[in-house]
Image (spheres, grey):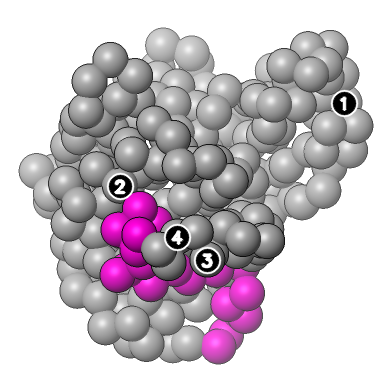
Amino acid sequence: QVYAYANEQGDIEHRVTWHDLALRTDALTGYLRRERGLNVGDRVLLVYPPSIDFVIAFAGCLRAGLIPVPVYPPNPRKFDSGMEAFHRIAHDCDAQLILTSEQYERTRNRGGVQRLAEQDPSRWTLALDWVTTDTIQNGSYEPLYGPEPERDDVALIQYTSGSTSAPKGVVITHGNLAHQMEYTRTAMKLTADSRCVFWVPQYHDLGLIGGIVTALAGHVQLTLCSPYAFIKRPALWFDLLHREKAT
């Protein structure tokens, strides 16, 4: 196991092995590069509620040589500051495609949301296609990987929250990630048998780099839960630490 995901009751809904991760990301690389015609270095928005689907999309983009841009999913029922920040990020990074989950896509299109968006298409960046990655079946597309990255190649773009000004993109290179992974592994004495439980948001530097990417580097086995579930019942975290035998 490399990843697990727990629901609000603390029950594990998904466990993902390295084999599972390889199969799902293989299919995603093939879809994005072959079916959608994306090129190495193209930027892709990742708009997901907390989930394993985000992890698969993030890893798939890296394997395909694409640049993932994690974005906090705006409330699809409100055209507020979150929507404005989303709109700015999509244009600022010159995104070519938006990846999301079937769950969020249903919410986005529920009721009158789509009709409201069609009155002002730019508000939902409708010029870009939305793709639900959790509907892509294993083995459905022949994989197409990106080249072996150099240290100075861009790995991802992280945006500030935009709470005090327009969101600003920070370029993170593969060298940045490699340095941080080695620093974290050494400082925390991590091994492939280390077991961590995280509730920190997947868009946050600690949740994304300290948790998801650290597991992707093979340094820990990671159990995730939604930050909303933690806020609702903080004791959930302690229950998971016990159940998952966190180190």
- Is mark 3 in CB contact (under 8 Å) with mark 4? yes
For disc 3, the marked residue is 115
Q: Secondary structure beneath disc 1?
A: helix
Residue 124 lies within the magenta run: yes
Residue 193 lies within the magenta run: no
Q: Earlier in the sequence, mark 2 or mark 1?
A: 2
Q: Amino acid at mark 3?
A: Arg
Disc 2 to disc 4, C-alpha distance: 12 Å
Disc 2 to disc 1, C-alpha distance: 41 Å
For disc 2, the marked residue is 87
Q: Secondary structure beneath disc 4?
A: helix
For disc 4, the marked residue is 117
- Seen in the picture, residue 24 relative to 14 is either above or below; the reply is below
Disc 3 to disc 2, C-alpha distance: 18 Å
Looking at this view, is 111 or 62 the one in front? Answer: 111
Which residue lies at the image location 71% right of the left edge and 32% below the top edge?
225
The mark found on residue 176 in the picture is none
The C terminus appears in which quarter of the rendering? Answer: top right
For disc 1, the marked residue is 243
Q: Nearer the viewer, mark 3 or mark 2?
A: 3
How far across and how far down the image is residue 119, in percent?
A: 40, 63
Disc 1 to disc 4, C-alpha distance: 44 Å
Q: Nearer the viewer, mark 1 or mark 3?
A: 3
Q: Amino acid at mark 2?
A: His
Magenta region: 120-140
